[in-house]
Image (tube, rainbow, N blue to C red):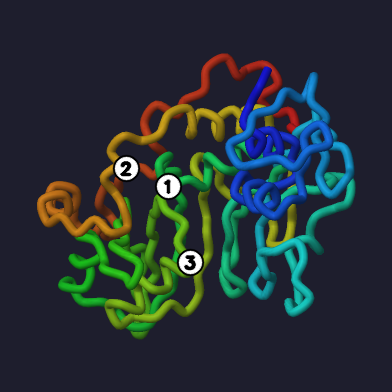
Amino acid sequence: MKSRLQKVMAQAGLCSRREAETWISSGRVTINGRPAVLGQVADTDVDKIAIDGRPLQMRLQRVYLILNKPRGYTTSLKDRHAEHLISELIPSKFGRVFPVGRLDKETSGLMVLTNDGLLAHHLMHPSYAVPKVYEAWVEGVPRRAHLARLTRGIQLDDGYSHPRDVRVIRTESNRTLFSLTLTEGRKREVRRIFESIGHPVISLKRVAFGSLTLGGLGEGDIRPLTHREVKELYTLVEQPQRKNSKNRRDDRSSEYTQSRFTARGVKYPGRAAISTRQSGHTVGNTRRNSGRDYR
Protein backbone atom coordinates (compact mmCIF):
# COMPACT_ATOMS: atom_id res chain seq x y z
CA MET A 1 0.00 0.00 0.00
CA LYS A 2 1.38 3.36 -1.01
CA SER A 3 1.74 6.18 1.51
CA ARG A 4 3.50 9.51 1.60
CA LEU A 5 7.18 9.03 2.24
CA GLN A 6 7.30 11.15 5.41
CA LYS A 7 4.44 9.06 6.84
CA VAL A 8 6.31 5.84 6.07
CA MET A 9 9.43 7.16 7.81
CA ALA A 10 7.44 8.23 10.86
CA GLN A 11 5.76 4.83 11.06
CA ALA A 12 9.21 3.22 10.96
CA GLY A 13 10.00 5.08 14.18
CA LEU A 14 12.94 6.99 12.72
CA CYS A 15 11.62 10.49 13.28
CA SER A 16 8.58 12.71 13.26
CA ARG A 17 6.91 13.68 9.99
CA ARG A 18 8.40 17.16 10.20
CA GLU A 19 11.90 15.76 10.66
CA ALA A 20 11.30 13.39 7.75
CA GLU A 21 10.43 16.32 5.50
CA THR A 22 13.71 17.98 6.45
CA TRP A 23 15.66 14.80 5.67
CA ILE A 24 13.93 14.47 2.30
CA SER A 25 14.59 18.12 1.40
CA SER A 26 18.27 17.78 2.29
CA GLY A 27 18.72 14.81 -0.07
CA ARG A 28 19.31 12.19 2.61
CA VAL A 29 16.49 9.93 1.40
CA THR A 30 16.34 7.84 -1.79
CA ILE A 31 13.67 5.63 -3.36
CA ASN A 32 14.92 2.90 -5.66
CA GLY A 33 18.29 4.63 -5.86
CA ARG A 34 16.91 8.04 -6.83
CA PRO A 35 16.69 11.12 -4.57
CA ALA A 36 13.24 11.43 -3.01
CA VAL A 37 11.16 14.60 -3.18
CA LEU A 38 8.56 16.04 -0.83
CA GLY A 39 5.10 14.66 -1.48
CA GLN A 40 6.39 11.47 -3.06
CA VAL A 41 4.61 8.22 -2.22
CA ALA A 42 6.16 4.81 -1.67
CA ASP A 43 5.17 1.21 -1.03
CA THR A 44 7.45 -0.52 1.46
CA ASP A 45 6.59 -3.90 -0.06
CA VAL A 46 7.85 -2.82 -3.48
CA ASP A 47 10.10 0.23 -3.20
CA LYS A 48 13.59 0.30 -1.74
CA ILE A 49 13.84 3.26 0.62
CA ALA A 50 17.20 4.31 2.04
CA ILE A 51 18.33 7.04 4.44
CA ASP A 52 21.97 8.06 4.14
CA GLY A 53 22.47 4.97 2.00
CA ARG A 54 21.10 2.57 4.62
CA PRO A 55 17.92 0.59 3.86
CA LEU A 56 14.84 1.62 5.80
CA GLN A 57 13.85 -1.01 8.34
CA MET A 58 10.19 -0.98 9.24
CA ARG A 59 9.68 -1.59 12.93
CA LEU A 60 6.95 -4.04 13.74
CA GLN A 61 7.19 -3.71 17.51
CA ARG A 62 5.91 -0.45 18.91
CA VAL A 63 7.08 0.95 22.24
CA TYR A 64 4.99 3.29 24.38
CA LEU A 65 6.40 4.65 27.63
CA ILE A 66 5.53 7.13 30.36
CA LEU A 67 8.31 9.02 32.16
CA ASN A 68 8.17 11.16 35.29
CA LYS A 69 10.78 13.71 34.24
CA PRO A 70 12.74 15.37 37.06
CA ARG A 71 13.78 19.03 37.02
CA GLY A 72 17.18 19.72 35.52
CA TYR A 73 16.83 17.32 32.57
CA THR A 74 16.70 18.60 29.00
CA THR A 75 14.04 17.12 26.72
CA SER A 76 16.43 15.91 24.08
CA LEU A 77 18.11 12.66 23.12
CA LYS A 78 21.36 14.37 22.06
CA ASP A 79 22.65 17.76 23.18
CA ARG A 80 26.33 18.19 23.98
CA HIS A 81 25.62 21.43 25.85
CA ALA A 82 23.06 19.91 28.23
CA GLU A 83 24.11 18.76 31.69
CA HIS A 84 21.48 16.00 31.80
CA LEU A 85 19.29 14.49 29.06
CA ILE A 86 16.08 12.48 29.36
CA SER A 87 17.82 9.78 27.29
CA GLU A 88 19.83 9.00 30.44
CA LEU A 89 16.58 7.85 32.07
CA ILE A 90 15.52 5.47 29.27
CA PRO A 91 16.76 1.87 29.66
CA SER A 92 18.46 0.54 26.53
CA LYS A 93 16.05 -2.42 26.38
CA PHE A 94 13.35 -0.09 25.03
CA GLY A 95 15.42 0.83 21.97
CA ARG A 96 15.18 4.18 20.26
CA VAL A 97 12.17 6.19 21.34
CA PHE A 98 11.53 9.92 21.20
CA PRO A 99 9.45 12.31 23.33
CA VAL A 100 5.94 13.39 22.41
CA GLY A 101 6.31 17.15 22.89
CA ARG A 102 8.68 18.86 25.27
CA LEU A 103 9.02 20.01 28.86
CA ASP A 104 11.58 22.70 29.55
CA LYS A 105 14.57 21.97 31.73
CA GLU A 106 13.07 23.36 34.94
CA THR A 107 9.66 21.69 34.45
CA SER A 108 9.03 18.22 35.84
CA GLY A 109 6.33 15.64 35.33
CA LEU A 110 4.65 13.39 32.82
CA MET A 111 6.15 12.73 29.42
CA VAL A 112 5.11 10.18 26.79
CA LEU A 113 7.84 8.51 24.73
CA THR A 114 7.34 6.24 21.73
CA ASN A 115 8.74 5.02 18.43
CA ASP A 116 5.27 5.38 16.86
CA GLY A 117 5.88 8.48 14.78
CA LEU A 118 2.35 8.76 13.41
CA LEU A 119 0.69 8.66 16.83
CA ALA A 120 3.25 11.14 18.20
CA HIS A 121 2.55 13.55 15.34
CA HIS A 122 -1.20 13.46 16.01
CA LEU A 123 -0.84 13.83 19.78
CA MET A 124 1.29 16.94 19.29
CA HIS A 125 -0.87 18.52 16.58
CA PRO A 126 -3.10 21.33 17.94
CA SER A 127 -6.06 20.26 15.78
CA TYR A 128 -6.58 17.24 18.07
CA ALA A 129 -6.71 19.44 21.19
CA VAL A 130 -5.17 16.80 23.47
CA PRO A 131 -5.45 18.17 27.04
CA LYS A 132 -2.33 18.52 29.17
CA VAL A 133 -2.76 19.35 32.87
CA TYR A 134 -0.14 21.31 34.80
CA GLU A 135 0.22 22.23 38.45
CA ALA A 136 2.05 25.50 39.01
CA TRP A 137 3.13 27.29 42.16
CA VAL A 138 3.23 31.01 41.40
CA GLU A 139 4.48 34.00 43.37
CA GLY A 140 1.89 35.89 45.40
CA VAL A 141 -1.90 35.60 45.37
CA PRO A 142 -3.46 36.83 42.09
CA ARG A 143 -6.43 39.18 42.28
CA ARG A 144 -9.78 38.23 40.80
CA ALA A 145 -9.21 40.57 37.86
CA HIS A 146 -6.07 38.63 36.99
CA LEU A 147 -7.88 35.33 37.33
CA ALA A 148 -10.63 36.56 35.01
CA ARG A 149 -7.97 37.31 32.38
CA LEU A 150 -6.80 33.71 32.56
CA THR A 151 -10.27 32.37 31.80
CA ARG A 152 -10.84 34.82 28.92
CA GLY A 153 -7.50 34.08 27.28
CA ILE A 154 -4.10 35.70 27.47
CA GLN A 155 -2.44 37.58 24.62
CA LEU A 156 1.13 36.31 24.22
CA ASP A 157 3.72 37.42 21.69
CA ASP A 158 2.80 34.50 19.42
CA GLY A 159 -0.99 34.80 19.73
CA TYR A 160 -3.73 34.12 22.26
CA SER A 161 -3.41 31.33 24.78
CA HIS A 162 -6.76 29.79 25.72
CA PRO A 163 -6.59 27.63 28.87
CA ARG A 164 -9.38 25.09 28.84
CA ASP A 165 -9.61 24.96 32.61
CA VAL A 166 -8.10 27.06 35.43
CA ARG A 167 -8.44 26.19 39.10
CA VAL A 168 -6.93 27.51 42.31
CA ILE A 169 -5.96 24.48 44.38
CA ARG A 170 -4.44 26.18 47.40
CA THR A 171 -3.27 29.61 48.51
CA GLU A 172 -0.62 30.49 51.09
CA SER A 173 0.62 33.81 52.38
CA ASN A 174 3.00 34.49 49.50
CA ARG A 175 2.23 31.87 46.84
CA THR A 176 -0.65 30.11 45.05
CA LEU A 177 -1.00 26.62 43.58
CA PHE A 178 -2.87 26.46 40.27
CA SER A 179 -4.13 23.66 38.06
CA LEU A 180 -4.12 24.66 34.40
CA THR A 181 -5.28 22.65 31.37
CA LEU A 182 -3.92 23.49 27.91
CA THR A 183 -4.48 21.89 24.51
CA GLU A 184 -1.50 23.42 22.72
CA GLY A 185 2.20 22.90 23.23
CA ARG A 186 3.80 26.29 22.75
CA LYS A 187 7.22 27.01 24.20
CA ARG A 188 7.11 27.92 27.90
CA GLU A 189 3.42 28.66 27.54
CA VAL A 190 2.41 28.19 31.19
CA ARG A 191 5.29 30.30 32.44
CA ARG A 192 4.51 33.09 29.97
CA ILE A 193 0.82 33.05 30.92
CA PHE A 194 1.55 33.70 34.59
CA GLU A 195 4.31 36.20 33.84
CA SER A 196 1.78 38.20 31.83
CA ILE A 197 -0.40 38.71 34.94
CA GLY A 198 2.57 39.56 37.16
CA HIS A 199 2.84 36.26 39.07
CA PRO A 200 5.91 34.31 37.87
CA VAL A 201 6.02 30.54 38.20
CA ILE A 202 8.05 29.16 41.10
CA SER A 203 7.72 25.49 40.12
CA LEU A 204 5.85 23.69 37.38
CA LYS A 205 4.82 20.07 36.92
CA ARG A 206 2.77 18.28 34.25
CA VAL A 207 0.45 15.84 36.00
CA ALA A 208 -1.69 14.54 33.12
CA PHE A 209 -1.49 13.99 29.37
CA GLY A 210 -4.87 13.12 27.88
CA SER A 211 -6.17 10.28 30.04
CA LEU A 212 -2.70 9.42 31.40
CA THR A 213 -1.66 10.42 34.91
CA LEU A 214 1.50 9.85 36.90
CA GLY A 215 -0.22 7.71 39.51
CA GLY A 216 2.48 6.34 41.81
CA LEU A 217 5.32 6.67 39.28
CA GLY A 218 8.36 8.03 41.10
CA GLU A 219 10.44 10.95 39.89
CA GLY A 220 12.90 9.78 37.26
CA ASP A 221 11.07 6.46 36.82
CA ILE A 222 9.73 5.09 33.55
CA ARG A 223 7.28 2.31 32.66
CA PRO A 224 5.57 0.87 29.57
CA LEU A 225 1.97 1.85 28.93
CA THR A 226 -0.66 -0.83 29.26
CA HIS A 227 -2.69 -2.00 26.27
CA ARG A 228 -5.67 0.00 27.55
CA GLU A 229 -3.64 3.19 27.93
CA VAL A 230 -2.34 2.92 24.36
CA LYS A 231 -5.89 2.44 23.06
CA GLU A 232 -6.99 5.53 24.98
CA LEU A 233 -4.24 7.59 23.34
CA TYR A 234 -5.40 6.43 19.92
CA THR A 235 -8.97 7.33 20.85
CA LEU A 236 -7.85 10.89 21.58
CA VAL A 237 -6.71 11.36 17.98
CA GLU A 238 -9.40 9.49 16.05
CA GLN A 239 -10.74 12.79 14.69
CA PRO A 240 -9.53 16.40 14.91
CA GLN A 241 -11.53 18.55 17.29
CA ARG A 242 -13.67 20.71 15.01
CA LYS A 243 -14.01 23.46 17.60
CA ASN A 244 -10.24 23.79 17.71
CA SER A 245 -10.10 24.79 14.02
CA LYS A 246 -11.02 28.30 15.12
CA ASN A 247 -8.45 28.35 17.88
CA ARG A 248 -5.57 29.70 15.82
CA ARG A 249 -2.74 31.54 17.51
CA ASP A 250 -3.49 34.70 15.55
CA ASP A 251 -7.25 34.58 16.21
CA ARG A 252 -8.22 37.84 17.88
CA SER A 253 -11.95 37.63 17.23
CA SER A 254 -13.75 39.13 20.21
CA GLU A 255 -16.90 37.21 19.30
CA TYR A 256 -15.06 33.89 19.51
CA THR A 257 -13.24 34.85 22.70
CA GLN A 258 -16.45 35.91 24.45
CA SER A 259 -18.44 32.88 23.34
CA ARG A 260 -15.70 30.52 24.53
CA PHE A 261 -14.64 32.04 27.79
CA THR A 262 -16.94 34.57 29.41
CA ALA A 263 -19.30 31.89 30.67
CA ARG A 264 -16.50 30.27 32.66
CA GLY A 265 -15.01 31.45 35.89
CA VAL A 266 -11.97 30.35 37.85
CA LYS A 267 -12.68 27.21 39.85
CA TYR A 268 -11.87 27.48 43.53
CA PRO A 269 -11.54 24.64 46.04
CA GLY A 270 -14.95 23.29 46.92
CA ARG A 271 -16.53 24.06 43.54
CA ALA A 272 -17.11 21.57 40.77
CA ALA A 273 -14.38 21.65 38.14
CA ILE A 274 -14.64 20.78 34.48
CA SER A 275 -13.19 17.37 33.82
CA THR A 276 -9.89 17.40 31.97
CA ARG A 277 -10.81 14.25 30.08
CA GLN A 278 -12.73 14.89 26.88
CA SER A 279 -16.09 13.22 26.44
CA GLY A 280 -16.17 10.12 24.31
CA HIS A 281 -12.81 8.80 25.43
CA THR A 282 -14.06 5.60 26.92
CA VAL A 283 -12.50 2.51 25.48
CA GLY A 284 -14.66 -0.46 24.80
CA ASN A 285 -13.76 -4.13 25.03
CA THR A 286 -10.61 -3.58 27.06
CA ARG A 287 -11.17 -6.19 29.74
CA ARG A 288 -8.80 -8.54 28.02
CA ASN A 289 -5.14 -7.57 28.36
CA SER A 290 -6.11 -4.28 30.06
CA GLY A 291 -3.17 -4.49 32.40
CA ARG A 292 -0.62 -5.82 29.96
CA ASP A 293 2.50 -3.80 29.28
CA TYR A 294 2.56 -2.51 25.72
CA ARG A 295 6.10 -2.46 24.41
Q: Is residue 95 left or right of residue 132?
A: right
Return the disc, 3 or 1, that comes first in the chain's sequence. Answer: 1
Look at the numbered disc 1 and give the secondary structure of its residue.
helix
Could you tell me how far apart the alpha carbons at marks 2 and 1 are, in whole angstroms?
8 Å
* Quarter location, residue 59: top right
**Residue at 39% in and 60% down:** 179
Q: Is residue 39 left or right of residue 251?
A: right
* Quarter location, residue 128: top left
Q: Which residue is mark 2?
A: 244
Residue 238's mark?
A: none
The amino acid type, in three-letter code, at marker 3 is Lys
Return the disc, 2 or 1, that comes first in the chain's sequence. Answer: 1
Look at the numbered disc 3 and give the secondary structure of its residue.
loop
Q: Position of residue 10 (x, y in %)?
A: 68, 39
Could you tell me how far apart the alpha carbons at marks 3 and 1 are, in whole angstroms?
13 Å
Residue nearest the viewer, comparing 84 with 145: 84
Q: Is residue 54 left or right of residue 129?
A: right
Q: Quadrant of the N terminus?
A: top right
Q: Which residue is mark 3?
A: 187
Could you tell me how far apart the alpha carbons at marks 2 and 3 are, in whole angstroms?
19 Å
Eyeballing the image, is 241 above or below 114? above
The amino acid type, in three-letter code, at marker 2 is Asn
**Residue at 38% in and 82% down:** 139
**Residue at 75% in and 42% down:** 35
Q: Which residue is mark 1?
A: 126
- Other-residue count near label 3 (Cα within 10 Å), few / some / many at <14 / 14–19 / ≥20: few
Asked if labels 1 and 3 touch by Cβ distance under 8 angstroms, the answer is: no
* Quarter location, residue 290: top right
Eyeballing the image, is 132 above or below 294? below
Return the disc, 2 or 3, that comes first in the chain's sequence. Answer: 3
Asked if labels 1 and 2 touch by Cβ distance under 8 angstroms, the answer is: yes
